[in-house]
Image (cartoon, coloured by chain):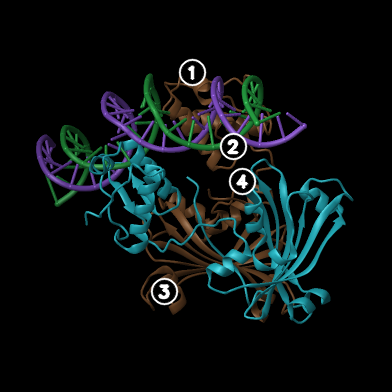
Chain colours: A cyan, B brown, C green, D purple
Amino acid sequence: MSLELSVDRSSPVPLYFQLSQQLEAAIEHGALTPGSLLGNEIELAARLGLSRPTVRQAIQSLVDKGLLVRRRGVGTQVVHSQVKRPLELSSLYDDLEAAGQRPATKVLVNTVVPATAEVAAALGVAEDGDVHRVERLRLAHGEPMAYLCNFIPPGLLDLDTAQLEATGLYRMMRSAGITLHSARQTIGARGATAAEADRLAEPEGAPLLTMQRVTFDDTGRAVEYGTHTYRPTRYSFEFQLLVRT
Amino acid sequence: MSLELSVDRSSPVPLYFQLSQQLEAAIEHGALTPGSLLGNEIELAARLGLSRPTVRQAIQSLVDKGLLVRRRGVGTQVVHSQVKRPLELSSLYDDLEAAGQRPATKVLVNTVVPATAEVAAALGVAEDGDVHRVERLRLAHGEPMAYLCNFIPPGLLDLDTAQLEATGLYRMMRSAGITLHSARQTIGARGATAAEADRLAEPEGAPLLTMQRVTFDDTGRAVEYGTHTYRPTRYSFEFQLLVRT
DNA sequence: GTAGTTCGATTGTCCGGACATACGCATTGA
DNA sequence: TCAATGCGTATGTCCGGACAATCGAACTAC
C-alpha cells in the first residue's frame, strides 16, 4: 500500500483536516480497501512530519463519520461496508439535486399571516403575530413530488419568490448568515385529503408520507417550521445512521 | 453560577468523561441555563486541576451532542433550545419502553429459510443460503402497532422465541457480543395489502408507514435486515438531528 | 493437546506549553 | 455621527512527551 499522503504547511487549511480529507478520498477511491489496517499512529505521524495528536484528530473525525474503526491493541481499520453519507440536515432541494434530478419549484403562496397557535408554539413567537407563510410544490421531471408548507419568523430573511424557485430555503438561510444547528422532525403517513390529492395529482385517500420539522439556529432560535407531504411512490426518506458510542 | 465541579483521579473513569457528564447533568438539571457562558477553558482547567486538552475533550463531546456551541473570541455557551436526544440507532422496543408504553411482542414466525435474492443482497450472503426469518407483531395497550419481519444471518445469535418476546432484537444482539455500528434505513408509505391489513387490524388499502433497515456491526458485516410496517395512527418517527459542521 | 501466561504492539488518556485566529469592544480618526 | 483601527480575550491548531489499558499471538507449563 504505502499511500501517498502529504500535507502543506503553508496552507491555511488545518493540517488534521488536510489529512482527514486525503484519507477519506483514499477510502472513497478504493486506495484504502475495507478491512485494511491504517498503520499505527506514531509511525504515520513520523512519516508525515506531524505530531501524534494531529494525526489522531484526523483519524477521529473519520471515526465519527463512521468510515474507520479503532481497536486498541490492534489498529485502525477501514470499515468495510457501504457507508454512504450519515444522516444530515438537508433540504429536499439539495437531496434531489444530489440525485441528479434537476428539481423544479413552484411557489404557490408567499405572504405574511398571523401565527396560529400551532405555528406560534413551534416557532416560539406570539400567537397572532406576523409570520411568513410559503407554500411550494416541488416537481421532478414535471411531476409533482411534494407539497411544502413553511412558516418563517419575520425579519430573518428576504423571501424573494424568484429566489425561492431557483434554489432551496435552507440555502437561502445559509447565505443570509443564519447558522443552522439542529432540527426536530416527525415522519408519519396518512391518507390524502381532497385538497392534498388535487395538489399532488393523487386520488383522494391515497397514502401520503408526511414530515414536520422545526429548525433551530445556533443561538437556539427556531428559524423555520414546515409541514410537508410527499408522494410515497416518488419519494422516500433514505439515510444512514451511526450508533452513538 | 460557580457550579460545583470536581473530578476523582482515583476513578478508572476518564477525567474528560467525568467532566462532560457533570456538565451534561448541570445543563439537564438547569444549573447551567441556556445561553449562559461556560467560562474560559484555561481558567476552568486550572480550577479543576486539569489540563486544557482534557477540558477541551469534555467540552467537545458535548458540542458533538449539540448541547454546547463554541464561538471563537466569545466563549462556549449552552445551546438555548429544547435539545432532546439526537437520532440514534434504536429499536422500536426501546423507543416504546422509553415512552413508558410497556410494549408486548408476539412472535409469529421463527424459522430458517433460504435467502431470497433481495435478502441475500441486503445481508451479503449467498442466495438460497440459510437465514433466520423472524416475524413479530408489536403491541401497545393490547393494540397492534407494527409488524416486523427480520432476516438474520445464521450462526450469529441464538434466536430464542421466549427471549424475543421478552426483549428486543437489538438488545439480544448486544448481549451476544455484537457491536452495532451503523444502519441504512428507508422510510416510506403505501397502502396496506389484504394480508397486512388483517395483521394490523386496519382496512385494506389503509395508509401504512414502512421502514426497511440493514444493520451493520463494526466489522462491516450485515447482521440484520428488516422490513417493518407501522400503523401511522399509532406510531411515527420522531427524532432530532444535528447539522454536521 | 490444552489452558494459562507473558509480551509486544497499538490505541486511550493526560499533561504543559506555544502560537494563530477570530470576535467584540473601546478608542481613534475623518 | 460614523467608520476605521487597535487591543484584549477566547477558542483553534499544533507540538512532544509520558504512562495506562487492552488485544492478539507466541510461549510455557501441565
The residue that label 3 is drawn on is B120
Q: Is residue B24 left or right of residue B234?
A: left
Protein chain holding label 2: B
For marks 4 and 3, the one nearer the N-term is 4
**What is the quadrant of residue B28 in the picture?**
top right
Disc 4 and disc 2 in contact, CB within 8 angstroms: no
**Residue beneath label 4, please?**
B85
**Tags 3 and 2 on a common chain:** yes
Q: Position of residue B198 (x, y in %)?
A: 69, 76
Badge 1 is on which residue? B46
Q: Amino acid at mark 4?
A: Arg
Residue B126 to residue B102: above or below: below
Residue found 32% across the figure and 60% down from its top: A34
Same subunit: marks 1 and 3: yes
Residue B71 pos. (x, y %): 57, 35
Q: Earlier in the sequence, mark 1 or mark 3?
A: 1
